[in-house]
Amino acid sequence: MFRTLGIALLCLVALAPSRVEAEAPTVIVKQGDALSLIAERAGVSVEQIKEWNHLNGDLIRIGQKLVVGPSTKVDPAKAEPAVADSADDSIDWTPPFDYGSAAPEAPEAPNDRAPRVAARDPATAVAARAYDKPAEKKKRGRTYRVQTGDTLTGIALKHDTTVAELLASNPGLEADRIYPGQTIDVGAPRPEVVFKLERGDTLLAAANRYDVSARDLARWNARLNDRTPRAGTDVRIYTRVPVSPSEAIGPTNRGRLENPVLLPPHRGYVIRTPARTYGTEETTRWIVAAFEAVDAKFKHTKVVRVHDISDRNGGRLRDHKSHQNGRDADISYYQDECSSSGCRFDGFRSSELDVARQWTLLEYWLRNGQAEMIFVDYRLQARLYRYAKRRGVTKAQLDRWIQYPRGRYEPEGVIRHFPNHEDHLHVRFVCPYSDLKCRP
């Protein structure tokens, strides 16, 4: 009897609700933030934030994630269950299979250099995220012993930082009063950003974009003597400003959009509702670039329609399950006959597809690694597949890019079938690698 009673007590203990540790509250550092301001907003002390984040000094960078509170213990029996707004809100507007392998982990940067971040370079659009690494104890800042003839400006340039950061890291230091033998804390190096100039860009615009002086930018790029370098030129910048101002947060069916960018007008498309065409900076730029590629190949411009990307701040968009974080876009197909108001957004025969233009548009995103998936009706995939094959696209590329001819339910290829896409394509762009809260 006692043995039976003991077993029953053990079972009750095992079934009793345990206390679990909840995730600690965090904030993302924005321009103008300081540890004292963040501590005041969070109702904690600066020393607590330093302890929780293993900080040895007061230096923080824009885009850095900081823990601003302790982990809390939660009793599961008392916790309120998460309730969806409606029965199907948790269902993504996507087929039930994996859409591709995750981006490779970023290789560790050498100890004496910051990670190199590529900006606005299509070839590196799916590079591993620059800062998506487990939190590590921050290393102490580097020091430099002043040599004869040194200036604070020269020291800043040599260590990929600015005079303002040197003064902030060295209380009592005066810019015009340094002496040989003096030790200066030069802090952690700024990340190196490679900014690829596009048509219309200027060096001054690049400097303003990343909050650096034009003088520093010129010194970092001494080979660029021409004041108007050509599009495609790489410009080296050392900055703590995020690569992209906009941010896709969360999954496409339960997400939001910060610092949205409105899709600009273009002669290759018409926009149905501008208020519903906000996206990340990358999404809007990649859409425009793809239509530029079509324009460059064909003398006559044919217009399609862009219906929806996302609302201004993301979140739920009427008539959609996805389109919530600025990475989805609905675009009508190129057709043989299109009016000045754009190729229609209704059903048509596959024989009416303008295959050449349609493949040119899709191929731009595929070759540049910018599309996570593209929903195209299976009957249209067949014509695109045969056209691409005739144009010299290899079988290996076709196997990676397009689902056809493996069947409409096979989880292979970026271009895939999904119901209700007979009259338009749905492109989902990859998570920008600078958006650490974006979820594929």
Image (cartoon, grey):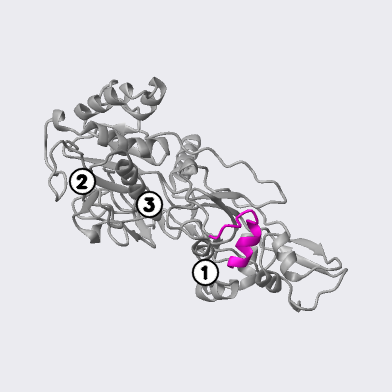
Please indicate whether residue 220 sits to the left or right of residue 422 in the image: right
Viewer-nearest of discs 1 and 3 = 3
Task: Report which quarter residue 425 is drawn in.
Answer: top left
**Nearer the viewer's eye, disc 1 or disc 2?**
2
Q: Are marks 1 and 3 in contact (CB under 8 Å)?
A: no
- The answer to whether residue 385 is above or below residue 168 is above
Inspect the magenta stretch and tell me whether residue 226 lies in it.
yes
Residue 199's x, y, as percent?
A: 43, 53
What is the distance, in whole Å, between disc 2 and disc 3 at their CAs? 17 Å
Q: Which residues are magenta?
A: 213-227
- Sequence-wise, which precedes: disc 1 or disc 2? 1
Q: Earlier in the sequence, mark 1 or mark 3?
A: 1
Instruction: Identify the element where label 3 is drawn.
Output: helix
Determine crowd level at label 3: few under 14, some 14-19, many 20+ residues with C-alpha closer than 10 A: some
Left or right: where 93 falls relative to 202: left
Residue 399 in picture, x, y percent from top left: 37, 24
Measure the alpha-carbon separation of dots 1 and 2: 39 Å
Q: What is the CA distance from the residue labelled 1 to the residue labelled 3?
A: 24 Å
The type of residue carrying mark 2 is: Val
Q: Up-down: is 155 above or below 5?
A: below
Q: Earlier in the sequence, mark 2 or mark 3?
A: 3
Q: Nearer the viewer, residue 75 or 6?
A: 75
Q: Amino acid at mark 3?
A: Arg
Q: Magenta stretch containing residue 161, yes or no?
A: no
Q: Position of residue 167 (x, y in %)?
A: 70, 74
- Amino acid type for the residue under numbered disc 1: Gln
Q: Position of residue 143 (x, y in %)?
A: 78, 62
Residue 433, placed above or below residue 402 = below
Residue hosting label 1:
31
Q: Which residue is mark 3?
A: 285
Residue position for label 2: 304
